[in-house]
Protein backbone atom coordinates (compact mmCIF):
# COMPACT_ATOMS: atom_id res chain seq x y z
CA UNK A 1 0.00 0.00 0.00
CA UNK A 2 1.36 3.41 -0.93
CA UNK A 3 0.30 6.25 1.33
CA UNK A 4 1.77 9.34 -0.23
CA UNK A 5 3.05 11.98 2.19
CA UNK A 6 2.64 15.47 0.81
CA UNK A 7 5.64 17.72 0.39
CA UNK A 8 3.46 20.81 -0.04
CA UNK A 9 2.23 21.10 3.55
CA UNK A 10 3.11 19.85 7.00
CA UNK A 11 0.53 17.16 7.91
CA UNK A 12 1.14 18.01 11.59
CA UNK A 13 -0.25 21.51 11.04
CA UNK A 14 -3.95 21.68 10.36
CA UNK A 15 -4.79 22.64 6.80
CA UNK A 16 -8.20 21.92 5.29
CA UNK A 17 -9.51 21.74 1.74
CA UNK A 18 -13.07 22.30 0.52
CA UNK A 19 -15.04 22.68 -2.71
CA UNK A 20 -12.85 25.58 -3.87
CA UNK A 21 -9.78 23.32 -3.77
CA UNK A 22 -11.12 20.47 -5.91
CA UNK A 23 -9.08 21.36 -9.00
CA UNK A 24 -5.95 21.75 -6.85
CA UNK A 25 -6.46 18.32 -5.30
CA UNK A 26 -7.19 16.81 -8.69
CA UNK A 27 -3.89 18.03 -10.06
CA UNK A 28 -1.97 17.06 -6.96
CA UNK A 29 -3.18 13.47 -6.92
CA UNK A 30 -3.93 12.87 -10.58
CA UNK A 31 -7.69 12.43 -10.17
CA UNK A 32 -9.50 11.51 -13.35
CA UNK A 33 -11.84 13.92 -15.11
CA UNK A 34 -14.76 11.66 -14.16
CA UNK A 35 -13.76 11.73 -10.47
CA UNK A 36 -13.36 15.50 -10.54
CA UNK A 37 -16.74 16.00 -12.19
CA UNK A 38 -18.46 13.82 -9.59
CA UNK A 39 -16.72 15.54 -6.67
CA UNK A 40 -17.41 19.00 -8.07
CA UNK A 41 -21.08 18.23 -8.75
CA UNK A 42 -22.04 16.32 -5.63
CA UNK A 43 -20.23 18.73 -3.30
CA UNK A 44 -22.80 21.32 -4.35
CA UNK A 45 -25.37 19.29 -2.42
CA UNK A 46 -23.46 17.34 0.22
CA UNK A 47 -20.71 18.91 2.34
CA UNK A 48 -17.08 18.29 1.40
CA UNK A 49 -14.05 18.95 3.57
CA UNK A 50 -10.77 17.09 3.95
CA UNK A 51 -7.45 17.90 5.60
CA UNK A 52 -3.76 17.30 5.07
CA UNK A 53 -3.50 14.51 7.63
CA UNK A 54 -6.26 12.47 5.95
CA UNK A 55 -4.78 13.09 2.51
CA UNK A 56 -1.24 12.19 3.51
CA UNK A 57 -1.68 9.42 6.07
CA UNK A 58 -5.01 7.67 5.50
CA UNK A 59 -5.80 7.51 1.77
CA UNK A 60 -4.08 4.93 -0.42
CA UNK A 61 -3.78 6.89 -3.65
CA UNK A 62 -2.75 3.78 -5.60
CA UNK A 63 -6.27 2.37 -5.07
CA UNK A 64 -8.31 5.34 -6.25
CA UNK A 65 -11.27 5.38 -6.62
CA UNK A 66 -11.84 2.16 -4.68
CA UNK A 67 -9.82 3.07 -1.59
CA UNK A 68 -12.21 3.01 1.41
CA UNK A 69 -10.91 6.22 2.99
CA UNK A 70 -11.16 8.02 -0.36
CA UNK A 71 -14.83 6.99 -0.53
CA UNK A 72 -15.20 8.03 3.09
CA UNK A 73 -14.24 11.67 2.49
CA UNK A 74 -14.60 12.41 -1.26
CA UNK A 75 -18.06 12.57 -2.86
CA UNK A 76 -18.64 9.75 -5.36
CA UNK A 77 -20.87 9.20 -8.35
CA UNK A 78 -24.02 7.41 -7.15
CA UNK A 79 -24.41 9.42 -3.96
CA UNK A 80 -27.11 11.40 -5.73
CA UNK A 81 -29.82 10.10 -8.02
CA UNK A 82 -28.58 10.10 -11.61
CA UNK A 83 -31.14 12.69 -12.75
CA UNK A 84 -30.29 15.00 -9.85
CA UNK A 85 -26.58 14.72 -10.55
CA UNK A 86 -27.17 15.53 -14.21
CA UNK A 87 -29.33 18.57 -13.35
CA UNK A 88 -26.75 19.97 -10.92
CA UNK A 89 -23.92 19.33 -13.39
CA UNK A 90 -25.78 21.12 -16.20
CA UNK A 91 -26.52 24.14 -14.00
CA UNK A 92 -22.88 24.29 -12.91
CA UNK A 93 -21.69 24.28 -16.50
CA UNK A 94 -24.24 26.95 -17.42
CA UNK A 95 -23.22 29.14 -14.48
CA UNK A 96 -26.88 29.44 -13.43
CA UNK A 97 -26.39 30.20 -9.74
CA UNK A 98 -30.03 30.98 -9.00
CA UNK A 99 -31.25 27.80 -10.66
CA UNK A 100 -28.51 25.83 -8.90
CA UNK A 101 -29.55 27.13 -5.47
CA UNK A 102 -33.14 26.11 -6.10
CA UNK A 103 -32.28 22.61 -7.29
CA UNK A 104 -29.81 22.05 -4.45
CA UNK A 105 -32.48 23.04 -1.90
CA UNK A 106 -34.96 20.67 -3.54
CA UNK A 107 -32.52 17.75 -3.55
CA UNK A 108 -31.47 18.32 0.07
CA UNK A 109 -35.09 18.41 1.21
CA UNK A 110 -35.58 14.99 -0.38
CA UNK A 111 -32.58 13.49 1.44
CA UNK A 112 -34.34 13.37 4.83
CA UNK A 113 -31.97 15.88 6.47
CA UNK A 114 -33.17 15.11 10.01
CA UNK A 115 -33.86 11.38 10.31
CA UNK A 116 -35.83 9.75 13.12
CA UNK A 117 -37.83 12.91 13.73
CA UNK A 118 -34.99 14.75 15.43
CA UNK A 119 -36.47 18.20 14.96
CA UNK A 120 -40.06 17.13 15.56
CA UNK A 121 -39.65 14.77 18.51
CA UNK A 122 -36.32 15.35 20.25
CA UNK A 123 -36.14 19.11 20.84
CA UNK A 124 -36.84 19.81 24.53
CA UNK A 125 -38.77 22.73 25.95
CA UNK A 126 -38.54 24.77 29.12
CA UNK A 127 -41.52 26.82 30.27
CA UNK A 128 -43.14 26.29 26.89
CA UNK A 129 -40.12 27.50 24.89
CA UNK A 130 -38.13 25.19 22.62
CA UNK A 131 -34.43 25.10 23.46
CA UNK A 132 -32.07 25.54 20.49
CA UNK A 133 -29.05 23.30 20.10
CA UNK A 134 -30.32 20.48 22.30
CA UNK A 135 -31.94 17.08 21.89
CA UNK A 136 -33.47 14.95 24.64
CA UNK A 137 -34.61 11.59 23.33
CA UNK A 138 -33.64 9.26 26.19
CA UNK A 139 -34.38 10.08 29.82
CA UNK A 140 -30.78 9.88 31.08
CA UNK A 141 -29.01 11.68 28.23
CA UNK A 142 -29.18 15.15 26.68
CA UNK A 143 -27.36 15.98 23.44
CA UNK A 144 -25.81 19.44 23.33
CA UNK A 145 -24.64 21.16 20.13
CA UNK A 146 -22.38 24.14 20.95
CA UNK A 147 -22.63 26.68 18.18
CA UNK A 148 -18.87 26.99 17.65
CA UNK A 149 -18.45 23.21 17.31
CA UNK A 150 -20.70 22.61 14.33
CA UNK A 151 -18.06 21.67 11.81
CA UNK A 152 -15.44 18.90 11.63
CA UNK A 153 -11.78 18.44 10.72
CA UNK A 154 -13.02 16.47 7.69
CA UNK A 155 -16.48 15.38 6.60
CA UNK A 156 -17.57 11.77 6.22
CA UNK A 157 -19.59 11.30 3.06
CA UNK A 158 -22.02 9.03 4.95
CA UNK A 159 -22.54 11.42 7.90
CA UNK A 160 -26.11 11.43 9.17
CA UNK A 161 -25.53 14.97 10.46
CA UNK A 162 -24.63 16.31 7.02
CA UNK A 163 -27.37 18.96 7.37
CA UNK A 164 -25.30 20.67 10.10
CA UNK A 165 -22.66 21.60 7.53
CA UNK A 166 -24.50 22.98 4.49
CA UNK A 167 -25.08 26.52 5.75
CA UNK A 168 -28.86 26.30 6.21
CA UNK A 169 -29.78 27.69 9.64
CA UNK A 170 -33.19 26.02 9.49
CA UNK A 171 -31.56 22.59 9.35
CA UNK A 172 -28.89 23.22 11.97
CA UNK A 173 -28.79 22.43 15.70
CA UNK A 174 -26.65 25.05 17.47
CA UNK A 175 -26.64 26.51 20.98
CA UNK A 176 -24.98 29.91 21.50
CA UNK A 177 -24.06 29.07 25.09
CA UNK A 178 -24.73 26.63 27.94
CA UNK A 179 -27.07 28.78 30.04
CA UNK A 180 -30.34 27.23 28.85
CA UNK A 181 -28.83 23.75 29.03
CA UNK A 182 -27.82 24.27 32.65
CA UNK A 183 -31.29 25.56 33.54
CA UNK A 184 -32.85 22.56 31.85
CA UNK A 185 -30.56 20.14 33.67
CA UNK A 186 -31.41 21.68 37.05
CA UNK A 187 -35.08 21.09 36.25
CA UNK A 188 -34.49 17.52 35.00
CA UNK A 189 -32.43 15.69 37.63
CA UNK A 190 -32.98 12.33 35.90
CA UNK A 191 -30.45 13.44 33.27
CA UNK A 192 -27.08 12.01 34.26
CA UNK A 193 -25.24 12.25 30.93
CA UNK A 194 -24.58 15.17 28.60
CA UNK A 195 -23.23 14.36 25.15
CA UNK A 196 -21.39 17.34 23.66
CA UNK A 197 -21.65 16.74 19.94
CA UNK A 198 -22.01 18.37 16.55
CA UNK A 199 -20.25 18.64 14.23
CA UNK A 200 -17.26 17.96 16.43
CA UNK A 201 -16.63 19.78 19.71
CA UNK A 202 -12.90 19.13 19.29
CA UNK A 203 -12.87 21.64 16.44
CA UNK A 204 -13.15 24.34 19.11
CA UNK A 205 -10.26 25.81 21.02
CA UNK A 206 -9.92 24.48 24.55
CA UNK A 207 -10.80 27.91 25.92
CA UNK A 208 -14.06 27.89 23.98
CA UNK A 209 -14.82 24.29 24.85
CA UNK A 210 -14.17 25.00 28.52
CA UNK A 211 -16.77 27.79 28.46
CA UNK A 212 -19.37 25.18 27.48
CA UNK A 213 -18.19 22.40 29.78
CA UNK A 214 -17.36 24.08 33.09
CA UNK A 215 -20.94 25.27 33.73
CA UNK A 216 -22.07 21.63 33.59
CA UNK A 217 -19.96 20.97 36.68
CA UNK A 218 -22.38 23.12 38.69
CA UNK A 219 -25.12 20.52 38.13
CA UNK A 220 -24.65 17.76 40.70
CA UNK A 221 -26.94 15.31 38.92
CA UNK A 222 -24.75 15.29 35.79
CA UNK A 223 -22.34 12.41 36.32
CA UNK A 224 -20.92 11.80 32.84
CA UNK A 225 -19.82 14.22 30.13
CA UNK A 226 -19.40 12.65 26.73
CA UNK A 227 -17.64 14.15 23.72
CA UNK A 228 -18.65 12.85 20.30
CA UNK A 229 -15.64 13.22 18.02
CA UNK A 230 -13.96 12.04 14.85
CA UNK A 231 -10.82 14.01 15.72
CA UNK A 232 -8.85 10.99 16.95
CA UNK A 233 -9.21 9.51 13.46
CA UNK A 234 -9.07 12.67 11.31
CA UNK A 235 -6.91 15.01 13.41
CA UNK A 236 -5.19 13.17 16.30
CA UNK A 237 -2.77 16.09 16.69
CA UNK A 238 -5.64 17.82 18.50
CA UNK A 239 -4.69 15.72 21.53
CA UNK A 240 -0.93 15.62 20.94
CA UNK A 241 0.71 18.72 19.51
CA UNK A 242 -1.91 21.41 18.88
CA UNK A 243 -1.03 24.59 20.75
CA UNK A 244 -3.68 23.91 23.40
CA UNK A 245 -3.59 20.09 23.38
CA UNK A 246 -2.25 20.00 26.94
CA UNK A 247 -4.97 22.42 28.04
CA UNK A 248 -7.57 20.10 26.53
CA UNK A 249 -6.24 17.16 28.51
CA UNK A 250 -6.24 19.28 31.67
CA UNK A 251 -9.92 20.02 31.02
CA UNK A 252 -10.61 16.28 30.92
CA UNK A 253 -8.64 15.89 34.15
CA UNK A 254 -10.66 18.67 35.76
CA UNK A 255 -13.93 16.92 34.94
CA UNK A 256 -12.61 13.60 36.25
CA UNK A 257 -11.31 15.28 39.43
CA UNK A 258 -14.83 16.60 40.05
CA UNK A 259 -15.95 12.99 40.52
CA UNK A 260 -17.52 12.67 37.09
CA UNK A 261 -16.72 10.44 34.15
CA UNK A 262 -15.38 11.65 30.81
CA UNK A 263 -16.31 9.50 27.84
CA UNK A 264 -14.68 10.26 24.50
CA UNK A 265 -17.02 8.75 21.91
CA UNK A 266 -14.49 8.21 19.12
CA UNK A 267 -15.77 7.49 15.63
CA UNK A 268 -13.53 5.00 13.81
CA UNK A 269 -14.87 3.81 10.47
CA UNK A 270 -11.91 1.76 9.24
CA UNK A 271 -8.93 0.04 10.91
CA UNK A 272 -6.51 2.24 8.97
CA UNK A 273 -7.61 5.20 11.08
CA UNK A 274 -6.05 3.49 14.11
CA UNK A 275 -2.84 2.47 12.38
CA UNK A 276 -0.84 5.70 12.66
CA UNK A 277 1.55 6.35 15.50
CA UNK A 278 -0.01 9.73 16.27
CA UNK A 279 -3.50 8.22 16.60
CA UNK A 280 -2.18 5.66 19.09
CA UNK A 281 -0.42 8.42 21.00
CA UNK A 282 -3.59 10.54 21.04
CA UNK A 283 -5.58 7.72 22.62
CA UNK A 284 -2.87 7.11 25.22
CA UNK A 285 -2.87 10.78 26.17
CA UNK A 286 -6.66 10.89 26.44
CA UNK A 287 -6.68 7.81 28.64
CA UNK A 288 -3.95 9.26 30.87
CA UNK A 289 -6.47 11.86 32.08
CA UNK A 290 -8.84 9.23 33.42
CA UNK A 291 -11.16 9.53 30.42
CA UNK A 292 -12.50 6.39 28.74
CA UNK A 293 -12.48 6.09 24.94
CA UNK A 294 -15.53 4.34 23.44
CA UNK A 295 -15.49 3.48 19.72
CA UNK A 296 -18.42 3.42 17.33
CA UNK A 297 -19.23 3.66 13.63
CA UNK A 298 -21.87 2.65 11.12
CA UNK A 299 -21.55 -0.25 8.71
CA UNK A 300 -20.89 1.43 5.37
CA UNK A 301 -20.90 -0.19 1.96
CA UNK A 302 -17.61 0.31 0.07
CA UNK A 303 -15.84 1.32 3.30
CA UNK A 304 -16.11 -1.35 5.97
CA UNK A 305 -18.71 -3.85 4.76
CA UNK A 306 -16.69 -6.98 5.53
CA UNK A 307 -16.18 -8.89 8.75
CA UNK A 308 -12.40 -8.81 8.56
CA UNK A 309 -12.32 -4.99 8.66
CA UNK A 310 -14.52 -4.91 11.76
CA UNK A 311 -12.63 -7.66 13.55
CA UNK A 312 -9.33 -5.94 12.82
CA UNK A 313 -10.71 -2.58 13.95
CA UNK A 314 -12.20 -3.89 17.19
CA UNK A 315 -8.97 -5.72 18.02
CA UNK A 316 -6.97 -2.56 17.34
CA UNK A 317 -9.28 -0.57 19.61
CA UNK A 318 -8.86 -3.10 22.40
CA UNK A 319 -5.08 -3.10 21.93
CA UNK A 320 -4.85 0.64 22.65
CA UNK A 321 -7.16 0.44 25.67
CA UNK A 322 -10.32 1.72 24.00
CA UNK A 323 -13.74 0.09 24.30
CA UNK A 324 -15.51 -1.30 21.19
CA UNK A 325 -19.03 0.02 21.69
CA UNK A 326 -21.40 0.14 18.68
CA UNK A 327 -21.74 -1.02 15.10
CA UNK A 328 -24.58 1.13 13.76
CA UNK A 329 -26.74 0.64 10.70
CA UNK A 330 -26.35 3.51 8.24
CA UNK A 331 -29.24 5.90 8.88
CA UNK A 332 -31.97 6.72 6.36
CA UNK A 333 -30.59 10.10 5.34
CA UNK A 334 -28.26 11.70 2.81
CA UNK A 335 -26.68 9.28 0.32
CA UNK A 336 -28.18 6.33 2.20
CA UNK A 337 -28.91 4.31 -0.97
CA UNK A 338 -25.21 4.43 -1.86
CA UNK A 339 -23.95 3.28 1.53
CA UNK A 340 -26.68 1.06 2.93
CA UNK A 341 -26.14 -2.63 3.67
CA UNK A 342 -29.16 -4.98 3.98
CA UNK A 343 -29.89 -5.95 7.57
CA UNK A 344 -29.43 -9.65 6.91
CA UNK A 345 -25.90 -9.02 5.58
CA UNK A 346 -25.19 -6.59 8.41
CA UNK A 347 -26.14 -9.25 10.96
CA UNK A 348 -23.91 -11.79 9.22
CA UNK A 349 -20.94 -9.38 9.12
CA UNK A 350 -21.36 -8.56 12.80
CA UNK A 351 -21.68 -12.20 13.85
CA UNK A 352 -18.65 -13.29 11.83
CA UNK A 353 -16.48 -10.48 13.18
CA UNK A 354 -17.77 -10.96 16.74
CA UNK A 355 -16.91 -14.66 16.71
CA UNK A 356 -13.30 -13.74 15.93
CA UNK A 357 -12.89 -11.49 18.98
CA UNK A 358 -11.35 -12.16 22.37
CA UNK A 359 -13.79 -11.85 25.24
CA UNK A 360 -12.68 -8.37 26.31
CA UNK A 361 -13.58 -6.96 22.88
CA UNK A 362 -17.09 -8.41 23.00
CA UNK A 363 -18.33 -5.22 24.61
CA UNK A 364 -19.46 -4.17 21.15
CA UNK A 365 -23.15 -4.21 20.19
CA UNK A 366 -24.62 -4.36 16.74
CA UNK A 367 -25.90 -4.02 14.21
CA UNK A 368 -28.02 -1.25 15.77
CA UNK A 369 -30.57 1.02 14.11
CA UNK A 370 -30.83 4.38 15.88
CA UNK A 371 -34.44 4.88 14.86
CA UNK A 372 -37.40 6.98 16.02
CA UNK A 373 -38.46 4.73 18.94
CA UNK A 374 -34.89 4.06 20.07
CA UNK A 375 -31.86 1.89 19.38
CA UNK A 376 -33.05 -1.35 17.79
CA UNK A 377 -30.55 -4.21 17.91
CA UNK A 378 -30.65 -6.90 15.23
CA UNK A 379 -29.79 -9.96 17.28
CA UNK A 380 -29.78 -12.33 14.32
CA UNK A 381 -32.07 -14.42 12.14
CA UNK A 382 -34.39 -17.07 13.56
CA UNK A 383 -35.36 -20.00 11.32
CA UNK A 384 -38.82 -21.40 12.15
CA UNK A 385 -41.43 -23.66 10.49
CA UNK A 386 -43.48 -20.50 9.94
CA UNK A 387 -40.67 -18.77 8.11
CA UNK A 388 -37.58 -16.74 8.93
CA UNK A 389 -37.57 -13.78 11.29
CA UNK A 390 -35.20 -11.06 12.39
CA UNK A 391 -34.71 -11.18 16.15
CA UNK A 392 -34.90 -7.60 17.39
CA UNK A 393 -34.52 -5.86 20.73
CA UNK A 394 -34.74 -2.26 21.93
CA UNK A 395 -31.52 -1.60 23.86
CA UNK A 396 -32.43 2.06 24.33
CA UNK A 397 -35.86 3.61 23.94
CA UNK A 398 -37.78 6.84 24.02
CA UNK A 399 -40.08 4.94 26.41
CA UNK A 400 -37.64 3.26 28.79
CA UNK A 401 -40.23 0.62 29.71
CA UNK A 402 -39.51 -0.98 26.34
CA UNK A 403 -35.75 -1.33 26.92
CA UNK A 404 -34.45 -4.89 26.77
CA UNK A 405 -37.66 -6.42 25.43
CA UNK A 406 -37.40 -8.65 22.37
CA UNK A 407 -39.66 -8.72 19.32
CA UNK A 408 -39.28 -9.93 15.78
CA UNK A 409 -40.00 -9.08 12.16
CA UNK A 410 -40.33 -11.10 8.99
CA UNK A 411 -36.98 -11.77 7.37
CA UNK A 412 -36.31 -9.83 4.18
CA UNK A 413 -33.33 -10.01 1.88
CA UNK A 414 -33.57 -6.31 1.01
CA UNK A 415 -34.68 -4.60 4.23
CA UNK A 416 -32.11 -2.05 5.36
CA UNK A 417 -34.03 -0.05 7.97
CA UNK A 418 -36.77 -0.47 10.55
CA UNK A 419 -39.40 1.01 8.23
CA UNK A 420 -38.62 -1.72 5.68
CA UNK A 421 -39.64 -4.48 8.10
CA UNK A 422 -42.95 -6.25 8.60
CA UNK A 423 -43.32 -6.73 12.36
CA UNK A 424 -44.65 -9.98 13.76
CA UNK A 425 -48.22 -9.07 14.82
CA UNK A 426 -47.87 -11.28 17.91
CA UNK A 427 -45.40 -8.77 19.41
CA UNK A 428 -46.61 -6.95 22.55
CA UNK A 429 -49.01 -4.13 21.76
CA UNK A 430 -46.85 -1.41 23.34
CA UNK A 431 -43.87 -2.41 21.21
CA UNK A 432 -45.98 -2.50 18.05
CA UNK A 433 -47.32 0.95 18.90
CA UNK A 434 -43.86 2.36 19.62
CA UNK A 435 -42.27 1.01 16.45
CA UNK A 436 -45.10 2.03 14.11
CA UNK A 437 -44.39 5.10 11.94
CA UNK A 438 -46.91 7.29 13.83
CA UNK A 439 -45.69 6.33 17.30
CA UNK A 440 -43.64 9.41 18.18
CA UNK A 441 -45.49 12.66 18.71
CA UNK A 442 -44.08 16.18 18.87
CA UNK A 443 -43.23 17.12 22.43
CA UNK A 444 -42.95 13.48 23.49
CA UNK A 445 -39.18 13.40 23.70
CA UNK A 446 -38.99 11.23 26.81
CA UNK A 447 -41.28 8.87 28.67
CA UNK A 448 -40.43 8.59 32.36
Image (tube, grey):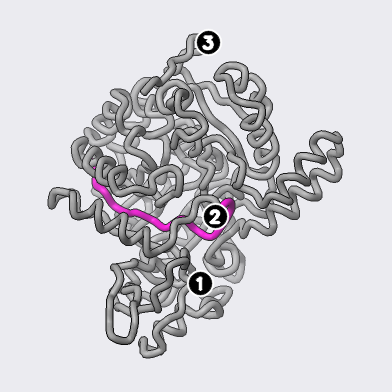
Residue 106, above or below 237:
below
Q: Is residue 92 left or right of residue 182?
A: right
Residue 85, above or below 371:
above
Q: Earlier in the sequence, mark 1 or mark 3?
A: 3
Quadrant where the image shows the N terminus: top left
**Mark 1 secondary-structure assignment:** helix
Q: Which residues are magenta?
A: 322-337
Residue 91, position as x, y percentages in the image: 82, 40
Q: Earlier in the sequence, mark 1 or mark 2?
A: 2
Q: Residue at x 54, y 46 (%)?
A: 177
Residue 397, above or below 432:
above
Specify few, some or many for label 2: CA neighbours under 10 Å numbering under 14, 14-19, or 20 or more: many
Quadrant where the image shows the C terminus: bottom left
**Mark 3 secondary-structure assignment:** loop
Most foreground residue, 189 or 358: 358
Specify few, some or many for label 3: CA neighbours under 10 Å numbering under 14, 14-19, or 20 or more: few
Q: Residue at x 43, y 42 (%)?
A: 303
* Residue 189 showing in the rendered view: no
Q: Is residue 328 magenta?
A: yes
Which mark is drawn over residue 336? Answer: 2
State how far apart marks 2 and 3 are (Cα). Answer: 35 Å
Q: Which residue is mark 1?
A: 419
Which mark is drawn over residue 8? Answer: 3
Q: Quadrant of residue 232?
A: top left
Q: Residue at x 35, y 28 (%)?
A: 239
Amino acid sequence: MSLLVSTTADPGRFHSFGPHHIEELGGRYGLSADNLHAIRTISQVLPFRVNEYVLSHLIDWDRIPDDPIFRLVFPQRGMLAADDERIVGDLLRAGDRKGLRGEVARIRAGLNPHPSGQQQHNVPSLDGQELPGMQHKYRETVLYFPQQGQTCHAYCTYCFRWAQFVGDADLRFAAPGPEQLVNYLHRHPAVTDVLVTGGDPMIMSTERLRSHVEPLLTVDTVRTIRFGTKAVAYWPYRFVSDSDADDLLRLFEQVVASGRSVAVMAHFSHPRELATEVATRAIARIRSTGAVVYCQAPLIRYVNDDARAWSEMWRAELAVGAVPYYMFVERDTGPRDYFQVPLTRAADIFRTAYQDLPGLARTVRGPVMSATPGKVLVDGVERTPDGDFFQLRLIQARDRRLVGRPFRARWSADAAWLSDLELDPTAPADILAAVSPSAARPGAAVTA
